[in-house]
Image (cartoon, helix red, strand yellow):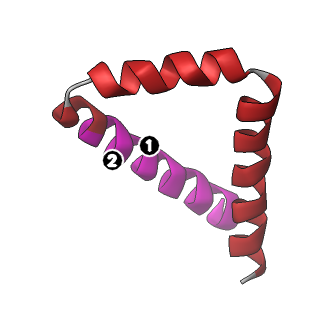
Amino acid sequence: MTIFLTALGLMLVIEGFLYGGIPNFAKRMAAMLLETPDEILRRAGLAAACAGLALIWLAHYV
């Protein structure tokens, strides 16, 4: 549970920095997301999830 809360907190820090620190960039990225085809977003999301799992595995078992 501690790891989950740490990960959740880190996600909130990153998103808070994005929206609070550089809001114009966040708006441009949101507009780009609306124009990106679903298949590309799906593949990018799955790739990011796999990379995250690999990092977690590396952090705990290597």
Distance Cα–Cα, label 2 vs label 1: 5 Å
Q: Which residue is mark 2?
A: 46
Tell me whether the residue at label 2 lies in contact with that at label 1, contact meaning CB atoms closer than 8 angstroms. yes
Left or right, 41 with respect to 57, comes to: left
SS at mark 2? helix
Q: In this picture, which residue range is highlighted in magenta? A: 42-62
Q: Main secondary structure of the magenta part?
A: helix
What amino acid is at disc 1?
Ala
Residue at 17% across / 35% down in the picture? 39
Q: Position of residue 49 (x, y in %)?
A: 43, 51
Residue at 60% across / 59% down in the picture? 56
Q: Position of residue 25 (x, y in %)?
A: 63, 16
What amino acid is at disc 2?
Leu
Judge whether 44 appears above or below 35 on screen.
Answer: below
Q: Which residue is mark 1?
A: 48
For the residue carrying disc 2, how many other residues have a C-alpha within 10 Å: few (<14), some (14-19), or many (20+)? Answer: few
